[in-house]
Image (tube, rainbow, N blue to C red):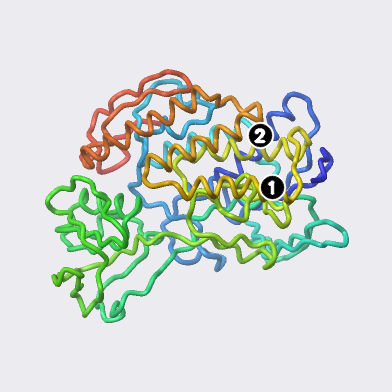
Amino acid sequence: MDHRATARIAIIGAGPSGLSQMRAFALLESSGQKIPEIVCFEKQNDWGGMWNYTWRTGFDEYGEPVHGSMYRHLWSNAPKECHEFADYSFDHHFSKSIPSFIPREAFRDYILGRAEESNMRRCIQFNTVVSYVEFDREKEIFHVRKKNLTTGKSSIEDFDYVIVAVGHFSMPNVPYVEGIETFPSQVIHSHDFRDARQFAEQSILVIGGSLSAEDIALQTFKFGAKSITISYRTKPIGCKWPSKIEEKPLLTRMEGRSAHFPDGSERNFDSIILCTGYKHHFPFLNDDLRLVTTNCFYPSQLYKGIFFQEQPRLIYLGMQNLYFSLSLFDAQTWYVRDVILGRIPFPNKLQRAEDMLAWKTREEKIEDKLDALDFQTAYLKELTSATDYPLDDLRLSGTAATFKNFLDDKESNIINYRDKQYASSITGTKAVMHPTPWMEVNNYSSVDFL
């Protein structure tokens, strides 16, 4: 690696991971240290990435694919205490204790509060999409082609490092179901789900078996769906569902409105929602730079889950299946900063490959959610122990314990788990109880967080 404080760094995306990377460098700059030149390209007109809610689906006003998958009534589906910045607490931001589960507006406000404090907006080119990135082996530099969406003008800039911070929850994975083309009503992917109210009094088929299937089933139940059937591919979610929600193995085919299931049963539905996940999608990267992976806990092409093995000056943030999110982004970005500045020795290709194999071997032993959580906790501990990020082992272990308590609470009662309160491992503050149970909160005007 070429460690230079005078390097030029391109960050693609000003969502949570991109903002974390800018924060890591900004803290050094505020202490008087010289940092590389940072240019962040963001195709939206504001920072926040996935947390920028839009009613649009499909394509935006410039013909670009809509990035966000947020829906109107989304709330955090894990306690905020599991996603707390170690250097910027919820107490600090809100100046009071708030509930453990918060609506998307409050979560976005928290993320952007730290970004504003870092004063890095000056580094961001908004309404600017990166259309192509290639590495010039002769000059040992990246050529980045960008386009200003408001003017339509394209140009090329050169960088020493490229950091991909676009996330992996924006390109829908849409599997084919036999006969689904005969279904006479609405079929949407969770990426395009915006408001559960439109499904009131309907019988809904949710295809999928992970967090989005779980939460969209709850959303449609909360806002008056007549019935919800969750059709899973591998194993049921396994929660104690109310009577209006049931789980069935993956349907075998559709015939008009009728879904046929492996047990021989069939049911008619009014709408189908595909909660079938997302693809890692990087069309702007040259083929030899493009990460190819499934949704896993340790992408096989990334050293430390971050640096592209074949060209380690290409950096990917947040490509893992996530338990931790904001703290994982911080752990990665502080590590990236210190590698670029030469504070952390960077091994040769063979040594990197051995380290990657050790982590992949460990990943293969994951059998359940608790194993996965322990795996990711160990991963964060390795990264944070090498930097000055203030998430020490004690705090991280405390956050992992909170995660496990939360998983138990959710399994016990899927309907009211968002009414529980947890304590922050960063500040020790215990959350307050929200005055209205989550199932009874139907609009945000009654939610005084901001």
Image check: 120 left or right of 397?
right
Q: In the image, what residue occupies the spot 66% across and 30% down?
A: 386
Q: In the depicted view, which residue is nearer to us: 79 or 186?
A: 79
Where is residue 371 shown, x and y percent of the image?
A: 41, 41
Q: In the depicted view, which residue is nearer to us: 127 or 393?
A: 393
The crowd level at tag 1 (other Cα within 10 Å; few <14, some 14-19, many 20+) is some
Where is residue 367 shown, x and y percent of the image?
A: 38, 47
Image check: 40 left or right of 33?
left
Task: State how far apart marks 1 and 2 are (Cα).
Answer: 24 Å
User: What amino acid type should be assigned to the residue bearing mark 2?
Assistant: Ala
Q: Quadrant of the C terminus?
A: top left
User: What amino acid type should be assigned to the residue bearing mark 1?
Assistant: Arg
| Relative height, residue 281 to residue 52 (above, below) | below
Q: In the depicted view, which residue is nearer to us: 106 or 172?
A: 172
The crowd level at tag 2 (other Cα within 10 Å; few <14, some 14-19, many 20+) is many
Per the rendering, the mark at residue 183 is: none
| Relative height, residue 189 to residue 90 (above, below) | below
Q: In the image, what residue occupies the spot 42% across and 30% down?
A: 81
Specify which label sits upstream in the sequence, 1 or 2.
2
Q: Quadrant of residue 261?
A: bottom left
Camera-nearest label, 1 or 2: 1
Q: Which residue is mark 2?
A: 24
Where is residue 117 shown, x and y percent of the image?
A: 61, 30
Q: In the image, what residue occupies the spot 40% across and 42% down?
A: 104
Image check: 373 left or right of 432?
right
Q: Which residue is mark 1?
A: 352
| Relative height, residue 245 to residue 340 (above, below) | below
Q: Is residue 152 visible?
A: yes
Q: In the image, what residue occupies the spot 12% across and 51% down?
A: 243
Q: Is residue 125 visible?
A: no
Q: Secondary structure beneath disc 2? A: helix
